């Protein structure tokens, strides 16, 4: 006979337990993104691609964009999971601060009931909007406001967690990513070594005015649509969220009441 779990005790004990778990899940997604991007880059470095020059003195560039040159959907999915968990972690933090304000009588019970479902972390379009938010959030102690301002929630990359990017990802489609190919430092073969009879490649090569060849050793970079490098940007974003949770731990470390 299966033993039933007492679910009353499967819950966070401290206000920052839940955001910390969300952050850790986002960090797991980051390592998967990193591995997938490395695999994608290595695949193209080894496989090579059809390349051409408009004239002999020009640099090599890829011919066309076949489906294998697009960033794998799995990368976008892991980025989506990462952004979602970071956004939720920050909203958890704000709710913990709002609950603390109620306990410290900086918010009335009536005001808490009216506003608690609308409390969220302020990801705003610019610093002016943040100043307006700060004036409207007098329940947050000034020291906590400085910590929030310290992660620059009105600048890139924190804006990835805001409505112009995160909400589109949440409600419409996976985030858009771009792959850039640097065809310098590799070598050019006279033709694709294992696909010399590929009619599609022949047609693409015939459509170019300059010399063509099979380029091996290309460097591949994956980025957001604005050109910011994917892995480095996500690492910066993770660092800011982690730093905020760590800074708030001393003031939000009281055990939650039993329910």
Image (cartoon, grey):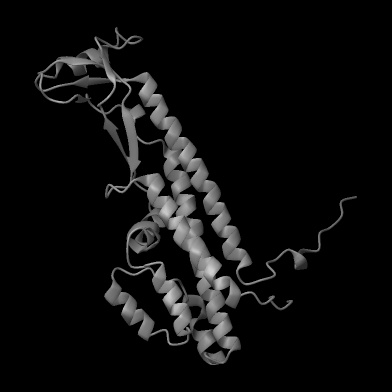
Q: Position of residue 68 (x, y in %)?
A: 36, 27
Q: Residue at x 49, y 59 (%)?
A: 86
Q: Quadrant of residue 101?
A: bottom right
**Image vertical order of residue 1 relative to residue 103, above or below:** above
Residue 23 visible in the current orientation: yes
Corner quadrant of residue 125: bottom left
Name the image quarter holding residue 160: bottom left
Residue 76, compared with residue 161, is above or below; it is: above
The residue depicted at 53 percent of the width and 75 percent of the height is 95
Residue 154 x/y as whole percent? 33, 68
Residue sitting nearer the eye, 172 or 98: 98
Q: Tell which residue pokes out farthest to the top in this image.
A: 197
Would you place residue 63 above or below residue 79 in this image? Answer: above
Residue 153 is left or right of residue 253, and the answer is: left
Is 141 left or right of 153, judged from the image as shown?
right
Quarter of the image with the C terminus is bottom right
Q: Which residue is drawn at the image coordinates 52% and 80% (left, top)?
A: 116
Q: Confirm whether residue 173 shows in the render.
A: no
- From the top left corner, tell me how far across and down residue 65 is, in percent: 27, 28
- Residue 2 or residue 134, whichever sits in front: 134
The vertical placement of 122 against 202, above or below, is below
Pick the residue in front: 139 or 233: 233
Count of residue discs: 0
Would residue 109 be found to the left or right of residue 37 on screen? right
Q: Nearer the viewer, residue 148 or 118?
A: 148
Residue furthest right as drawn: 1
Counting from the top left corner in percent of width and height, residue 72 is at: 41, 35
Q: Residue furthest front?
A: 185
- What residue do we see at 48% from left, 52% from top? 82
């Amino acid at each position: 006979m299966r033993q039933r779990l007492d679910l009353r005790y499967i819950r966070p004990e401290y206000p920052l337990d839940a955001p910390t778990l969300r952050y850790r899940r986002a960090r797991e997604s980051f390592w998967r993104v990193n591995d997938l991007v490395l695999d994608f880059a290595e695949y193209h470095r080894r496989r090579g691609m059809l390349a051409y020059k408009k004239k002999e003195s020009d640099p090599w560039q890829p011919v066309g964009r076949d489906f294998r040159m697009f960033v794998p959907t799995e990368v976008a999915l892991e980025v989506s999971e990462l952004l979602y968990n970071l956004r939720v972690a920050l909203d958890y933090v704000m709710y913990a601060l709002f609950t603390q304000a109620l306990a410290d009588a900086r918010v009335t019970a009536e005001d808490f009931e009216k506003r608690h479902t609308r409390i969220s972390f302020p990801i705003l379009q610019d610093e002016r909007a943040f100043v307006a938010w700060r004036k409207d959030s007098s329940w947050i102690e000034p020291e906590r406001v400085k910590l929030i301002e310290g992660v620059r929630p009105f600048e890139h990359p924190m804006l990835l967690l805001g409505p112009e990017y995160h909400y589109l990802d949440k409600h419409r489609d996976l985030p858009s990513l771009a792959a850039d190919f640097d065809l310098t430092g590799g070598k050019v073969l006279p033709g694709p070594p294992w696909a010399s009879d590929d009619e599609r490649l022949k047609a693409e090569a015939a459509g170019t005015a300059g010399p063509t060849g099979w380029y091996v050793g290309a460097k591949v970079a994956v980025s957001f649509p604005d050109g910011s490098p994917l892995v480095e940007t996500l690492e910066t974003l993770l660092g800011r969220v982690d730093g905020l949770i760590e800074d708030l731990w001393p003031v939000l470390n009281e055990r939650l009441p039993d329910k």
